[in-house]
Amino acid sequence: MAAVEQSSVATPAAARPNWLVRDLIGLAVILAIAAIGYFLFPNNLALLTRILAIALLVLSIDLVTGFCGIATLGHAALFGAGAYAAGIAAVHWGITDPLLMVVIGAAGGAVAGLISGAVILRGHGLAQLVLSIAVVNLFHEAANKASAYTGGSDGLSGIAPDPIFGMFAFDLWGRTAYGFAVVLLAVVFILLRLLTRSPFGMLCRGIKEDPIRVRAMGASVHGTLLKMYVISGLVAGVGGALNAISTQVVGLDSLSFTLSAESLVMLVLGGTGSLYGALVGTVSFMWFEDFVSAANPFHWLTIVGALLIVVVLFAPRGLYGSALALVDRFRGSGK
């Protein structure tokens, strides 16, 4: 009897290092790929930094769509809110410390997430999509009208971030910006892995599967989804602030419906409900888009569209999800 109790107690302890090791390996792979990109493409660091900033936006969409089942096509509102918050802080308030700008951008994204989440969560299904489109268009128009602060259609320029810790200045080659982006992505990714494995993350998964049962258990479905929407806005705001710091300009395109739609496509391409899938989809889409547009400037959209059709038809779980399914199948056949 004592042996049974000892084994039952030891099992969770043995399981915990298992997922921790997998997460550390995943983080090591991300950092290794980032290092390889730095040395292989030293002249394309601006593009790589842009990819990492958009990856944060796609991760934020995955939190509400992949883990909570909220349909949204307006998440660029949260990304743009973070970008404009960081940019306005630098240009109008003189706050040019990069870390403070990221904090302000995260706060701006969280506030935008609270506002837009309160509106979008009033609907369900197609109504949520319509509300999300309306929200991003309202944010876009508000930024355009507030030209005294945002620069309007001309964009907000003059953002000059200080050196990080007073030592690492932002250079023309984008090396500091890229390193800063890699660190931000790694920190956010680890925190999100912990969040999605927490009881709160499990509750969000339960709401996606069966909200009626979760409500019957006494949990607040609307409150939980709104909290996740705020967290999602925070992550998107970090991505927006990173984009403002790295490009040193914020334009209305950061609040565009096109950015929202492309980000959702990236998530579907990689695989929803998986943080790794969000990263794979972002890198694959943006790198392929850049390569094809340079090779064929007139028909690159057709090629990108064909790729998406092939992936949706033959890899419905996304690139990452389908790859995992293949690995599991080979393991099963090898036993």
Image: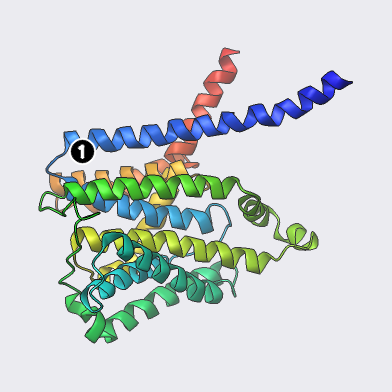
Which quadrant would residue 170 be assigned to in this image?
bottom left
Q: Is residue 155 above or below residue 309?
A: below
> In the image as oriented, which residue stretches furthest toward the right?
1
Identity of the residue drawn at 63% across and 55% down:
204
Identity of the residue drawn at 60% across and 75% down:
122
Q: Position of residue 194 (x, y in %)?
A: 54, 46
Specify whether residue 256 is in view.
no
Q: Residue 66 or 326: which is nearer the viewer?
A: 66
Direction from residue 252 to residue 14 in the image, left or right: right
Specify whether residue 284 is in view.
yes
Say how many tags the image has: 1
Q: Secondary structure at mark 1?
A: helix
Identity of the residue drawn at 42% across and 38% down:
319
What's the residue type where badge 1 is placed?
Answer: Tyr
Direction from residue 332 to residue 174 in the image, left or right: left
Which quadrant would residue 257 be assigned to in this image?
bottom left
Colour scheme in the image? rainbow
Q: Is residue 323 above or below residue 167?
A: above
Q: Is residue 171 above or below residue 153?
A: above
Q: Position of residue 160 (x, y in %)?
A: 17, 66
Q: Position of residue 191 (x, y in %)?
A: 48, 48
Q: Residue 125 or 282: which is nearer the viewer?
A: 282
**Which residue corresponds to mark 1?**
38
